Amino acid sequence: MKRITCGLAAAGLLCLAPMTAAASINEAFANGELAGQVGLYGISGKEKGSDRAGFISGSAALEYQTAPFHRLSLGFGAWGTTRLTQSNDGDYRGAIGSDAIIHQAFVRYAGDGWGEITAGRHGIDLEWLGDYILGVSAQLTPLENLALTLGWANRQAVVGIDEVSESFAKMNGSKGLYFVDLQYAPLEWLTVNPYYYHATDIYRAPGLKLTAEFALSDQWDSATMLQYVSTSTPSGVADGDFLWLEQSFALGDFAFGAGYMQADSKGGSNIASFGDQSPFEYGNNIFEPDAKTWYLALGYEWKALSLAALYGRTDDIGGAANAEAGEFNLVAGYGLYENLDLELIYADVRNKALAEDDFYSVSLGLTYSF
């Protein structure tokens, strides 16, 4: 289950409220905003036929953004992680590629009511592009009910309490990725989201996402999502389409839903090259050729407690009729005190045909944000 929370993930300082303009450079730095987090993370897992393995790590991050001066502001962020303990080669270095990384270093121009432009290392959260990029992006609001995000990314890194990239890695060699994402709400209940991603040597991917949200009654809410994306490559070898349907309902503090995903005979793995919004914690096979995935989800929130459960199964992996994998996720979150949050994630993946894809993991994260 991929989650992004304000202040602790890719959005970073984008989550801060607009700041008052500064009258001088000195004032811009003096009146800047500082945010950060301190975290403790541990994971333990076991593959079929292997011993249990895992690690515990501590992390800290600081993010700073100056107040705007002539509509320009500067942002900087650094993230550090240290291994506290590890058991049975728990692959700490596989998850935490770098113990220290500069994940934000950008300049931002805020327009007069029409949006903003950001250049450098900064966070982004789109349908098929996430985490942190080195590039240029523009978030524009030219019309009411219309939001346009477009840009170019040359490098990308994952930075979080549970995973950190070794560095900002090149995307598509040195050619990068171009992206355009348009969200338009012609009706109060309907959002139309066409998008296009272009990485010259990897794929061209036009897609469309439709979301309809209704209040069925004073207590019942409904959300329907339909998404289709088509990928093509210069050689045509890995061309593939991906379909995603989801229906969910909310009743008071409870939520439940179901979804279906399908990749065509050539697969849809290329579209997930730089990020995805998969509801699974792992979801290892959903983009494989001919893969058909269904899932059921249930959620509950009460005061500071949140619970979520998801079960899904992927059939016909690689076109083989008997190739299937199942995954169960259980997530519990609790706000211990103000800005102090605890999250427990249990994931169980079953794949009889592939031992390394038959495992379970338990992870616990404790974060204090400021």
Image (cartoon, rainbow, N blue to C red):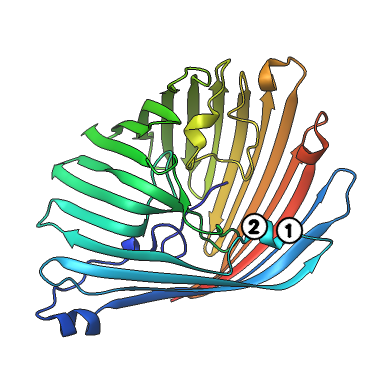
Query: Left or right of 169: which side holds 117?
Result: left
Q: Which mark is residue 91?
A: 1
Task: Identify the residue at image location x=32%, y=52%.
Answer: 135
Q: Quadrant of the C terminus?
A: bottom left
Instruction: Categorize mark 2 by other alpha carbons within 10 Å: few (<14), some (14-19), many (20+).
Output: some
Q: Quadrant of residue 203?
A: top left
Q: Secondary structure at mark 1?
A: loop
Q: Amino acid at mark 1?
A: Asp
Q: Position of residue 223 (x, y in %)?
A: 42, 34
For this orientation, the residue located farthest to the front is 174
Q: Nearer the viewer, residue 356 or 121?
A: 121
Q: Secondary structure at mark 2?
A: helix
Q: Position of residue 6 (x, y in %)?
A: 41, 61
Q: How many marks?
A: 2
Q: Amino acid at mark 2?
A: Ala
Q: Which mark is residue 9?
A: none
